[in-house]
Amino acid sequence: MQSTSLKPHVVTLGTAGGPRWWTGENAGKRSGIATAVVVGESVYLVDAGTGVGNQLMKAGFSTANLRGIFLTHLHSDHTIDLASLAIFGLFTLTPGQAPIHIIGPGDRGSLPPASPRAQVPPTPLYPKNPTPGTADMFSHLMQAYGTDLNDRVIDALRPSPLDHFIASDKSGNAIA
């Protein structure tokens, strides 16, 4: 399905929103939010919802085609498979491939106000860093998989995802 035309086009890889798995008649039929902007054989991914790696493959692409990943905001339904792209994607990168930049919102600096329905204000998770930006989020994801990644880098001589995926923050809290 790869195109040799440089005319850009869009491939919707997933349109299922919300942090949940779809059930009922749509069970297994929809994937999480992700859109590919394709220019020739280059793919620019917007969001990384559930199943984005499989959806890329079904569309005829792999991480070898990725040139950039853009995150519109840092809700889980837009980012949940970012780690799998970086970890599983290492097996499809091509020698000499330029790093894949991940660009998304920075630390927004404040939490939303507590719901007026709250009897007692909820305690935020990770109060020392409650609203990490894209770079921190990606670093934390890679750290969470440190055992696996170190085994693969040291024992299996696989490349580090940190050498091939570079996450950075755009100022502000959303990419529009």
Image (spheres, grey):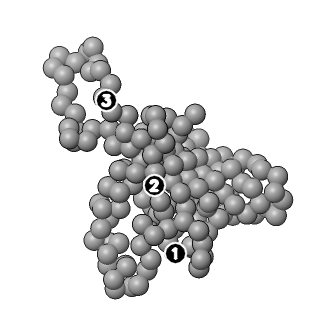
Mark before the other along the chain sequence, 3 or 2: 3
Question: Which residue shows up at 54% across the image and 65% down it?
Answer: 99
Relative depth, front residue between 55 and 155: 155
1 or 3: mark nearer the eye = 3
Residue at the limit of the structure toward the top, as seen here = 116
Question: Which residue shows up at 62% across the image and 60% down it?
Answer: 67
In the rendered image, which residue does mark 1 sit on?
A: 91
Quadrant for the C terminus in the image = top right
In the rendered image, which residue does mark 2 sit on?
A: 167
Q: Amino acid at mark 3?
A: Ser
Q: Amino acid at mark 1?
A: Phe
- Find residue 163 and report its horizontal and vertical position in percent: 45, 70
Could you tell me how far apart the alpha carbons at marks 1 and 3 are, in whole angstroms?
Answer: 38 Å
Q: For residue 124, which quarter of the picture?
A: top left
- Find residue 161 and report its horizontal and vertical position in percent: 44, 68
For residue 110, the mark is 3
Question: With 117 as the anchor, is 39 left or right in this view?
Answer: right
Question: Which residue shows up at 32% across the image and 78% down it?
Answer: 151
